[in-house]
Image (cartoon, grey):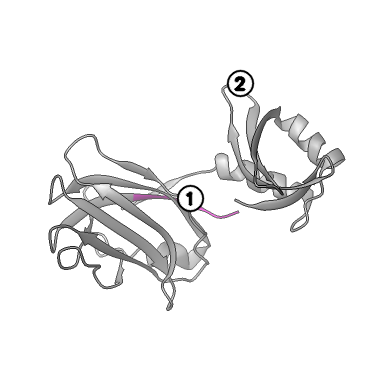
């Protein structure tokens, strides 16, 4: 998230809004024009009032900006695959070499593309459930479209437990896009079994 604003007379970029330890309050992270990162804590009402009185959102309407910030932290999440009897296995290329770009398809022949066909989506997590090469380093890239626009790349150390939950701060995937992965591992042809956590974009 990167929203241009003027806060207390200074140009800033609001980069994150997240719930604080106080119920109903949020941590607001923003970056100043001198590239200094600051954090403030406000209730939702205080944040709304601050935007209304001290800030001008330059790229979207204020109300929409606040709703978008809040939605990123409070939304319905979904997972792929969608059933406990299904799994999603991704395969690496030759040793220490990227595989080709490949569609993300689960063991029931369900293609992740069908999710993006209905609406723009955001991948928020990649949860590793099993690997074929323990103690090997994997790298995984997710992209979309004919130009394979990268939305995220992660580095994972294969192991049995604990399962690894990688939070993804990625670009949105536009509606109607084909989604791809490519994978690399120290062991050629190694596999990675995971599920994807995602939500519909606002």
Q: How many marks?
A: 2
Q: Residue at x 61, y 21 (%)?
A: 22
Q: Is residue 81 above or below residue 145?
A: above
Is 137 inside the magenta-drawn segment? no
Give the foreground label among 2 and 1. Answer: 1
Q: In the drawing, does residue 118 fall left or right of residue 91? A: right
Q: Residue at x 62, y 32 (%)?
A: 27
Query: Which residue does the numbered mark 1 point to in the structure image?
Result: 169
Q: Tell me the magenta residue range.
A: 196-202
In the figure, residue 180 lies in which quadrant? bottom left
Main SS of the magenta part reads: strand
Q: Secondary structure at mark 1?
A: loop
Query: Which residue does the numbered mark 2 point to in the structure image?
Result: 22
Nearest to the observer: residue 24 or residue 30 = 30
Q: Are marks 2 and 1 in contact (CB under 8 Å)?
A: no
Q: Secondary structure at mark 2?
A: loop
Q: Residue at x 65, y 48 (%)?
A: 68
Percent of width and height locating residue 78: 42, 48
Spatial separation of the CA atoms under disc 2 and disc 1: 24 Å
């Amino acid at each position: 998230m990167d929203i241009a604003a003027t806060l207390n007379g200074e140009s800033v970029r609001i980069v994150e809004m997240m719930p604080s330890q106080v119920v109903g309050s949020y941590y607001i992270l923003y970056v100043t024009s001198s590239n200094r990162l600051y954090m403030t804590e406000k209730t939702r009402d205080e944040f709304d009032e601050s935007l209304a009185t001290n800030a001008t959102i330059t790229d979207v309407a204020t109300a929409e900006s606040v709703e978008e910030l809040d939605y990123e932290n409070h939304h319905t999440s979904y997972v792929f695959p969608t059933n406990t009897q299904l799994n999603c296995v991704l395969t690496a290329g030759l040793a220490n070499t990227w595989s080709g770009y490949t569609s993300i398809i689960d063991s029931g022949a369900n293609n992740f593309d069908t999710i993006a066909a209905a609406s723009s989506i955001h991948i928020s997590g990649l949860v590793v459930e099993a690997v074929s090469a323990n103690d090997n380093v994997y790298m995984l890239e997710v992209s979309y479209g004919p130009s394979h626009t990268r939305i995220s790349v992660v580095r994972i150390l294969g192991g049995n437990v604990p399962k690894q939950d990688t939070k993804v701060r990625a670009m949105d995937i536009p509606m109607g896009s084909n989604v791809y992965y490519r994978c690399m591992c120290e062991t050629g042809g190694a596999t990675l079994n995971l599920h994807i956590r995602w939500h519909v974009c606002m």
